[in-house]
Structures are given as C-alpha cells and as structure tokens.
C-alpha cells in the first residue's frame, strides 16, 4: 500500500486462517487500501499488521463471522489496536474504523484539553 508521497506503507499479514479464502482476503485488501487513503496523512502510519480469522464450530463448519485484528504502528511510535467480529468484512472494517477514530480522538483531546471546552 502507498501513502500520498508514494511511500510504501508495509502491510504485514498474519498467516490467514485456513478457512479464509482468497476472495475474503482480496475484499479485505481493497477495504484496507481505502482505510489507508483515509488515515495516511492524519496518522502517519509506519506499518500495519492485520489478521483475518473465520471461526469454525466443533464440527468444522464456519459460524459465518469474520474476526479482523488491526495493529497500526505510527511513525511517532504509538500503536493503535482494533479488533472486530461481524458477519461481513465490510461491517468489520466499519467497526474497526470507528474504533480507530475513537482512539485518535481521545488522544487528541488529551493533547489539547482546552479545545473541547465551551466558553461562555
């Protein structure tokens, strides 16, 4: 994946679970590219580590859910981690995006505590 300066942002895939097929990995790759485009300037990502799992029950049948774990290592050294379990990969990435947004907003408020206060 590349950022706005055409610098490559390494994406490290944990070995996909045996139940993950290439279609799901490809879909997640497309959504991850959109995620990088959204966050590359604001977060200054050094690298991304991603894990995709599709759990199975004791009989070996898929329970039709996806578990995605995303670790972002930022240039400043901070690590952001988000995990989600949903019935579609798109829903998983939406949930992860929301969790990353929440983490970055809370740290922005810690850096600038006066910016959220109402004056009056």
Image (cartoon, rainbow, N blue to C red):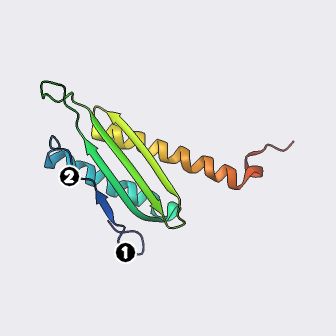
Q: Nearer the viewer, residue 65 or 55?
A: 55
- State the residue lying farthest toward the right: 120
Q: Residue, x 55% and y 47% (percent of image)?
A: 103
Q: Residue, x 72% and y 54% (percent of image)?
A: 112
Residue 25 position in % (x across, y down): 21, 49
Number of marks in the rendered image: 2
- For marks 2 and 1 on the same chain, the one whose residue lies earlier in the sequence: 1
**SS under mark 1:** loop
Q: Nearer the viewer, residue 74 or 3?
A: 74
Q: Is residue 87 above or below residue 93?
A: above
Residue 84 position in % (x across, y down): 38, 38
Q: Quadrant of residue 36?
A: bottom left
Q: Residue, x 34% and y 66% (percent of image)?
A: 10
The local crowd at label 2, few if under 14, some if 14 to 19, many if 20 or more residues have their Cα within 10 Å, is few
Q: Residue, x 34% and y 37% (percent of image)?
A: 91
**SS under mark 2:** helix
Q: Is residue 3 above or below residue 58?
A: below
The residue to which callout 2 is attached is: 26
The residue to which callout 1 is attached is: 6
The local crowd at label 1, few if under 14, some if 14 to 19, many if 20 or more residues have their Cα within 10 Å, is few
């Amino acid at each position: 994946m590349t950022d706005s300066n055409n610098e490559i942002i390494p994406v490290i895939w944990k070995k996909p679970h045996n139940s993950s097929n290439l279609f799901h990995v490809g879909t997640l790759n497309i959504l991850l590219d959109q995620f990088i485009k959204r966050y590359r300037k604001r977060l200054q990502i050094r690298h991304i580590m991603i894990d995709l799992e599709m759990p199975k029950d004791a009989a070996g049948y898929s329970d039709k859910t996806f578990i995605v774990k995303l670790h972002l290592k930022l240039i400043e050294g901070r690590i952001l981690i988000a995990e989600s379990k949903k019935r579609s990969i798109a829903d998983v990435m939406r949930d992860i995006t929301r969790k990353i947004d929440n983490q970055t907003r809370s740290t922005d408020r810690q850096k600038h505590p006066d910016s959220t206060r109402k004056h009056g």
